[in-house]
Image (tube, rainbow, N blue to C red):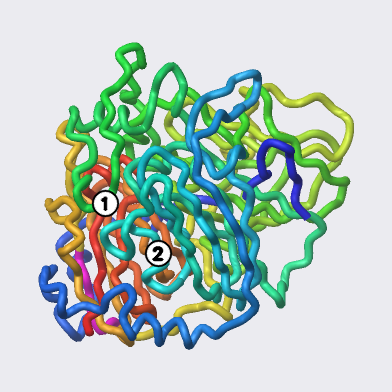
Amino acid sequence: MSEMHTRRAVLGAGVALAGAAGLASQAVTPSRAHAAPRRTPAPSPARAADQYVTPDGPEVVDAEARRGAGPVRKVSLTATSSRLELGGGLTVPSWAYGDRLPGEAIRVTAGEILELALANNLPQATTMHWHGLALRNDMDGVPALTQQAVKAGADFTYRFAVSHPGTYWIHPHSGVQLDRGLYAPLIVEDPKEPLAYDKEWVVVLDDWLDGVDGSTPDAVLDELTEGRGSAHDATGHQAARRAADGDAPSRLLVGASSDLLGGHAGDVAYPHYLVNGRRASDPSVFEAAPGDRIRLRVVNAGGDTAFRLALGGHRMTVTHTDGFPVRHTETDTLLLAMGERYDVLVTAGDGVFPLTALAEGKEASALAVLRTGLGAIPPATVRPAELDGELVTADRLAPDEAVALPERAPDRTVRMTLTGSMDAYDWAFDGKPYDPAVRHPVKAGERVRLVFTNRTAMWHPIHLHGHTFAMAGTALGARKDTAAVLPGRSLTVDFDADNPGLWMLHCHNVYHAEAGMMTVLGYLR
């Protein structure tokens, strides 16, 4: 079951921090940075397109055929300009999927074929990315890489097999459109669901500025990059390139700091933080009965904000991260990077309880409410004690045996250095801004090790399309598709190259990505 409001779907935890003290990735030292075994040295990124699998090539078609052909689930969705009510009487102009924030949850059962007809009624081109899904490459929604952008006034039908159950979400991969209202949860049901629970609460966290006092994400990107906007408009990431409204306030964030994030917490000063499209002054309310076992599916759809999440008066049992099950682990609070998802179970107490999402390092919070009995709605500023309690990070989670990546020496190691600075706003991999023609080669069947070394003063949540990786350490850990690399640290992950195509790898801070911190893993023919 899931709660539903007439204006919006009720949607739906910790930043994946690897290594030292359970909080950060391992410190960057020459000995640690070069310790990973490998059999085949990774070639330098290459531009020769004819040596790579194409997104619609026979290798991709064959891989899709092996996923099988189940029943077809048809969905229609319209991306359109809309006026969105954020609670407390605040209505803003934005873009959304329909007139809901977040968009209505898409539900499909693992083993089905999802066929989604997207109508683009926006004033600019767009695409749809299926965050976390291992799907066929030409349906991944990256313009000028896996498909041509869907032009304004046009439509496009995405069709692909859905193999893995879990909590996922959809959003554009065009410019900074993600930082508007264009997002929705994607729930892939497990036909053999092993969890027992009474109710499901889908929770989507967001930071919001679009339409507030004349602000737009495109103007914010221009302010951050001093007018350069997107570093790669010509490649199909269509930034609006509109000048900032002369009356719009500056959205540059100064002084945001978090020890959990290794220092600087974010670049953008958002006026509002939302849970399921609502401000803390007028939160959404989820109703249950005392003793109900509730499954929370939590998504961080923010553009620039990590959220620390806790449910007042309750411990949480983590069951999944990024769609994949883990050994059940209890915690008080979780930290979610942009793009991360966590599933947790709670046994509801009797009363009214705040679900608080602290905007980590930004001195603000979002709020939703669990109601099982009598009591007043908590104030917007409520801070449950659990926020300062036990924090379980992704490196402490062990995968469920059913999804654990088998131990295997890597066949190929790909090393990348995260570069850039706040002053220049020149975020990149290895000092080179995104170029879709430059690929890091891998081969089908390989075990690939990715080693990220963060030489910047900022944390970066790194997301890999089309695959899940295992957090690497003394043993292979939880399966993830998004994990944070803290300043001055490194992160090592392993994945099996089992889904041919051209796959985006990028920072999921939407402004860092648009400034250039994106690259491509390409399967060799």
In the figure, residue 306 lies in which quadrant? top left
Label annotation for residue 248: none
Q: Would you name the residue on which mark 2 appears?
A: 140
Q: Residue 31 in the image: x percent, y percent? A: 17, 66
In the displayed structure image, the side of residue 509 where residue 452 appears, left or right? left
- Where are the magenta residues, as a range? 410-415
Amino acid type, label 1 = Gly
In the rendered image, residue 4 lying in the magenta stretch gets the answer: no
Q: Residue 324 in the image: x percent, y percent? A: 55, 68
Q: Secondary structure at mark 2?
A: loop
Q: Residue 499 in the image: x percent, y percent? A: 38, 78
As displayed, is residue 130 above or below residue 72?
above
Q: Nearer the viewer, residue 225 or 246?
A: 246
Q: Nearer the viewer, residue 498 or 242?
A: 242
Q: Nearer the viewer, residue 203 or 34?
A: 203
In the rendered image, residue 411 lying in the magenta stretch gets the answer: yes
Amino acid type, label 2 = Asp
Q: Residue 250 in the image: x percent, y percent? A: 32, 19
